[in-house]
Image (spheres, rainbow, N blue to C red):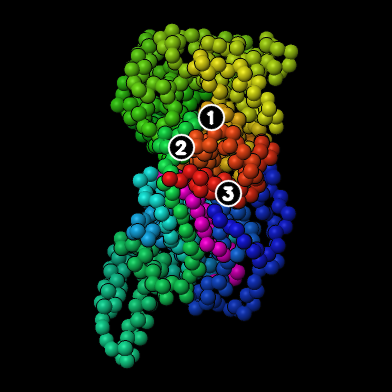
Amino acid sequence: MDLVGNNHEVSVPPIEGVCGGGTAYGWSDDGVQSTERLKGSIDPTQVPPSDLMNVWCMPSTANVGPQDMPRQIEPVNLLSARNEKESVQFAIRPKVSWGHSGTAGAVLVQCTDLCSTSGDRLSVGHSVTLRKVVPVLGIPDALVPLDMPASQINLFPGETTVIWVSIDVPSTQPSGIYEGEFVITAVKSDAESSAQSLGKTQKRQLYSDLRRCLESIEPVNITPDDNLLERMQSAATTLRTILVSPPFAEFLSENGPTDLMDEDAISNLSIRLKINLTVWDFVLPITPSLPAVFGISDTVIEDRFGVQHGSAEWYEALDFHFKWILQYRISPYFCRWGDSMRVLAYTSPWPAGHPKSEEYYSDPRLAAYAVAYKPVISSYASNDYLQNEVEILRNKNHWRKAYFYLWDEPLNMEQYDNLRTMACEIHAVAPDARVLTSYYCGPSDAPLAPTAFEAFVKVPKFLRPHTQIFCTSEWVFGNREDLVKDVLSEIKPEMGEEWWTYICMGPSDPHPNWHLGMRGTQHRAVMWRVWKEGGTGFLYWGANCYEKATVASAEIRFRRGLPPGDGVLYYPGEAFSQSHQPVASVRLERLLSGLQDFEYLKLYASRFGRGEALALLEKTGMYFGPERYTPDHMPIDVMRGEVFSTCRS
């Protein structure tokens, strides 16, 4: 997002936030333009919108809180590859109140299609989506979908409301420059209530009649001297204004919003921000270069949504979550936790021979999949379960994506021995199977070396040949990036071994992680760190692991003892609205952006070498190490712009 030359109208005070997260709570309204001339009852259709509210844009890495103060309005310039998703935020803050019942007033939020000069289009509701940023524990995080193509929202006195705009560029989208607009219109507070007095059938009939009226007067040709022309133009403008008003927002999609958005009618009533998107010819690979495997708790789904393990509704619920999370370049696995951190991890709840398993494992968006060590459903149990599963999968081209995840963070010899016993069973029927083990220490009761870190480094030798994917905690390294080489020296790629990393409760601020309240660049930098350190995969323990609840709409509570947001990257939609669609967090969107940055860096390295790509990270000031990375968005744009300039065809 291009914000060069941003001349703020207000001075920005020092920022204090949760975990140093850059949230701007507690700012005063000093410096906001005076609106003393607006007194008494205000009709928003008779007042310039700039007198009613401030609207400005912010990059996707900004934590825009309720007390954030206005910035200067500027055009939005974005860059996107094909098969990439880019986002930006628009903030709205009322200057005065024109509403009732404790609100400052209502606004109608719309976005046009993004169109290129060659006629190509990124359509609203499909490629372009709007979501409202809702605070969680006072921190902007939940992204609640808004109705498309137009949505009415309430503003509150002294509060900033934020809209998250995402543009999802298909892999087949023609390259070029696309332009569109984000449109905010102040409306009368009683518009919605008056609309509710009419049934949908009545509203549809009224909408149709008004539209026919508009169509009947527009093509009339009369002489310029006749004042009838002026009257008809005025009527057309009025009708257009009515047809894009809140009572008819639900019908706009039937005819498209853009054909009703008359320049004169809307310009005087709305604030319009231009969006420019450059789509270039690079296509992000459909199969992510970095396998990012994330856990989804099946027991959380069972409890909150009231589905019985193994029932038809259970399979439907898991299938829904699997397909939804794939859009974030994540390879999900479902998980159930046993004693002493034993874990049953599986990507498909169906047996290997089931058509749905083949559908899952063959999906090109899936970079890796977990195979269950034991039957997920008791009815599938048999003495030769493991052998039957492996025999089916080993004959498939996707077997190279398979792995077994048996134990999370073994701590003592008993747990390490149990892990090795399970791995032996697997390798007895599939010598080429990959076993993944996540760990942050060696066995505490049988030290492998004099110091804890030296023992940690020796784990690969201790677990060989029972583990092929050694997945280490980033917390162990602290700010000592140089210690990575000690671990890598123990990994034997020639034997098929890999080094992956993970984050969990740690590392904590200022290191990259996905805790609630951290800076946006701190969230995005998780994947920059993976790329710089040279990991070939990444694991995250849970994406939906909030506290147990037995009602879908129950309040979201983070688990006790964990940093806020740890293990929770998306929320049940029922907790925010009547929708059953999951609600993504801003942290999940920034995670996706980090994975996309990974692809940009990989492309650059393929052209100029890894050393030059590492130099690009530092030259742009984007990332130096786990405690030294940009707090601002601009270096991200500079890095991506450099890749675009040097790698486009």
**Eyeballing the image, is 250 above or below 99?**
above
Q: Which residue is mark 1?
A: 538
Pointer 2 or 3: first along the chain: 2
Residue 360: image location, x then y, percent: 36, 30
Q: Would you say residue 76 is visible in this rendering?
A: yes
Q: Residue at x 67, y 30 (%)?
A: 481
Q: Residue at x 62, y 61 (%)?
A: 5
**Eyeballing the image, is 573 above or below 246?**
above
Q: Label 3: how many residues lie within 10 Å, few (<14), some (14-19) or many (20+)?
A: some
Residue 186: image location, x then y, percent: 49, 69
Residues under numbered marks 2 and 3 in contact, where contact means CB atoms less than 8 Å apart: no
Q: Which residue is mark 2?
A: 329
Q: CA distance from mark 2 to mark 1?
A: 12 Å
Amino acid on which the number 1 mark rests in the picture: Phe
Q: As rendered, which of 84 and 375 lies closer to the eye?
A: 84
Q: Residue at x 68, y 15 (%)?
A: 455
Q: Secondary structure at mark 3?
A: helix
Q: Would you say residue 130 is visible in this rendering?
A: no
Q: As rendered, which of 449 and 78 lies closer to the eye?
A: 78
- Numbered mark located on residue 638 in the image: 3
Q: Residue at x 61, y 16 (%)?
A: 490
Pointer 3 or 1: first along the chain: 1
Identify the image quadrant of the C terminus.
top left
Q: Label 1: how many residues lie within 10 Å, few (<14), some (14-19) or many (20+)?
A: many
What range is drawn magenta here? 73-98
Q: As rendered, which of 611 and 526 lies closer to the eye?
A: 611
